[in-house]
Amino acid sequence: MGAKFSDIGKIIAQALQSKPVLEEGAKVIVEAVPLRTRLGKGVKEAEGPALPLPKLKTKTKSNRKLLAEKGELTGPGATPAKSGLNRTGDMLSGLKAIIKNGKFEIRLKDKQQEIKAGHVLKNNPDFAFMNISKAEMNRMIKAMSVKITEILSKIKFDSL
Amino acid sequence: MAETYTAFVDPNYTVSERREIARSIINYIVDRTKDGRGIGNKDFKKKYSNAYIKTSDFKIADKSPTDVNLTLSGDMLSSIEILDVSVVGRIVIGFEIDTEDDKARFVREKGYEFLGLSDSELQDILTEFGEPETETRPSDISENLVEEFVRGIFGR
């Protein structure tokens, strides 16, 4: 016996908590957050807009210029003047997703990176970057919906 | 003035049908743009400008100079929203976020017409969707329908 079409809402809600679907959503966010941050944008509130990160101070730019000359400004695409939390690239490169209890959480690679992020935010909370923007949420929903549709295509709905 | 696209459809479609059609339109526009084509499936320019290619953003996003698809972070295309389906026979899509709306206006002024459909593209979408007030058969589970359910669960 197949599933009832009228149960589709419940089936979708259950599928939304399944590992394969959460993995698709997490993949979008794990890729989007570092790219968006390196491009110079942060997100202050969950599902808010992605807005430019604070400009770097003159002293910081000078320090970064010296680092660049020594070959130590190694973040992907990093330039001395660009604000992107991207000096070495370490903090953003190891973003990971923890999938547990029907949800996923995005975390930095390890404790050292969490401490680094903590210092950045303590100095200036406007450098918030771990929230998901509205556009990123849309992409996540799209990816999860594609996966759920694939799952549903294997279910036989034989009654309304 | 905000960047929007208005589609006129059969007035017999219900609000929820117009919403699903709107979702189809958005997904079609996003996929077509990412394939490097604009309204009427016309190809975008073959190559980004040299000035743009030399920017740090272009390098950070690891883009190809000849893959013209209006996608750097993906935020602009992901920000196309259903703006209004409340009026019978009319669907409006566009941007709610000012920064993405500004971006869309900028690319349009540069000659990239992406936010919209030709008459034949709209007709193809409506043909695939079906006639108004069609009784939903158990097999009619489209990705757009699923996406509307998922958005509802996320409160969007």
Image (cartoon, coloured by chain):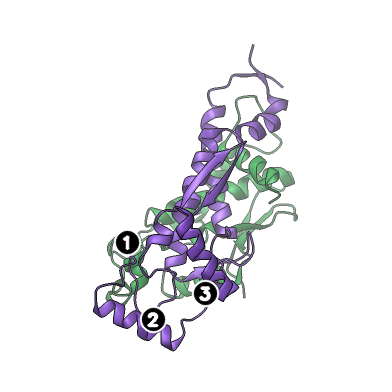
Q: Residue at x 56, y 67 (%)?
A: A128
Q: Residue at x 57, y 57 (%)?
A: A132
The x, y position of residue A30, in whole percent, is 47, 51
* Marks 3, 2: nearer the viewer: 2
Q: CA distance from mark 3 to mark 2?
A: 13 Å
Q: Based on the displayed image, in which of its 4 quarters is residue B133 positioned?
A: top right
Chain that bears disc 2: A
Report which colour depicts chain A.
Answer: purple
Report which colour depicts chain B.
Answer: green
Inspect this view and state whether residue B68 appears: yes
Chain that bears disc 1: B
Looking at the image, residue B126 sits to the left or right of residue B69; the answer is right
Contact? badges 2 and 1 (CB < 8 Å)? no
In this rendering, the count of numbered labels is 3
Reading the image, the residue beneath label 3 is: A52
Q: CA distance from mark 1 to mark 3?
A: 20 Å
Q: Residue furthest top?
A: A1
**Mark 3: few/some/many CA within 10 Å (<14, 14-19, 20+):** some
Q: Which mark is residue B62?
A: 1
Viewer-side residue, B115 vs A30: A30
Q: Based on the displayed image, in which of its 4 quarters is residue A72 positioned?
A: bottom left
Viewer-side residue, A20 vs A121: A121
Mark 3 or mark 2: whose residue is earlier in sequence: 3
Viewer-side residue, B116 vs B60: B60
The image shows residue B91, relative to residue A57, as above or below, that is above
The image shows residue B51, relative to residue B133, as above or below, that is below
Q: Which mark is residue A81?
A: 2
Q: Based on the displayed image, in which of its 4 quarters is residue B149 positioned?
A: top right
Circle 3 SS class: strand
Circle 1 SS class: loop
The x, y position of residue A20, in whole percent, is 51, 34
Q: Amino acid at mark 3?
A: Pro
